[in-house]
Image: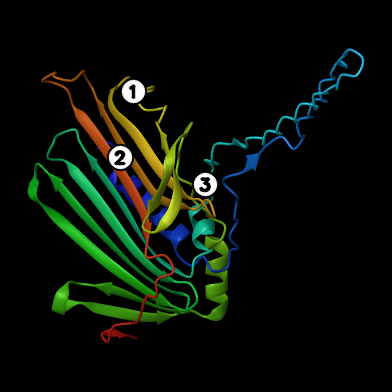
Amino acid sequence: MFLSRRALTLLTALLALSMLGCSDIPARLIRSLQTSGSSNPVETPPPIAQQAATAGPGATVTRPSALPPSPTPIPTPTRRPPNPAMTGIRTGLASLNSYQTTLRTVTSGPEPTDQNEITMISQVDSAKKASRTRMETREVNADNPKGSTDANETIAIGNQQCEISGQGASQKGNLTEQQPIEADLRGTLTGLLDVTLSAENPSFVAEETINGIPTNHFTFKVTQLGKDSGAVVRNNKGDYWLARDGQYLVKYTLALEAATAAQGSAKAQTFKADVSYELSNVNVPVTIAFPAFCKK
């Protein structure tokens, strides 16, 4: 596989730690757009001196008035490109009252039937220190063409946590409670982790609104792809959107494809990886509660 299932699970777990329990970390708000311009006014040239007119005796002499001064031009501000540097996911989310994040990773190869997909959806209410996270994993290969799916869900409110397993009517949950010192230690350790997704040599595209959030859109490429393996790179495209107020990540997409031979070769093995992340429902009230089957 292009990325092993273990590597995908580790990536998802790291991002999950960044997305949850972030109320104890202050947000760093970075101004992304600044303007500057010359404040020195352009001096107005003095009036052009007029030569005195001469006339004969008894004649009336008309003296032309001085030319009016030219208007002072208004300096045009120089607009700087937006700041492409993103804050860590955990730090950025700490500034929000509530939100939902969706993270999805899909890898395939070397055979077209080989595919692994992980989707994680998290809802957070920072004020109540409550979160709900659902992770689904789907794997397909030649030995299992129909595929297998696994899902689990975790609800945490304060120091209590419920691990939910099963599907539909067969769902059950185990409710546990941490001691205050355990919760304190866990929060301290997770506070040390702040993930920033890779974005090499980004280029500004445009100002865009994503899920109601004004953002700056950037594109980038992964420069390391194919250098060590000698693989033929068929697709290498990354995009990300940063909130203009706060620099936190709102959306991220990365599509990679590499092969052992050029396009059209019958013997080529192709590997693909797609990563997407999206922030939504920012500061929208959310209800997070333990279901009735969550019992100690």
Which residue shows up at 80% across the image and 27% down it? 65
- Precedes in sequence: disc 2 or disc 1: 2
Disc 2 vs disc 3: which is toward the camera? 3
In the rendered view, does 162 fall on the left or right side of 149?
right
Dividing the image into 4 quarters, which one contains the C terminus?
bottom left
Answer with the quarter of the image where residue 260 lies. Answer: top left
Q: Bin the neighbour count of mark 2 within 10 Å (Cα to Cα): few under 14, some 14-19, many 20 and up.
A: some
Q: Tell me, what colour scheme is on the image? A: rainbow
Which residue shows up at 92% across the image and 15% down it? 57
User: Mark 1 falls on what kind of element?
Assistant: loop
The CA span between labels 1 and 3 is: 30 Å
User: Mark 2 falls on what kind of element?
Assistant: loop
The label number, if any, that marks residue 109 in the structure image: none
Residue pointed to by mark 2: 3
Q: Amino acid at mark 2?
A: Leu
The CA span between labels 2 and 1 is: 14 Å
Above or below residue 196? Residue 219 is above
Q: Position of residue 202 (x, y in %)?
A: 47, 34
Residue pointed to by mark 1: 229
Residue pointed to by mark 3: 86
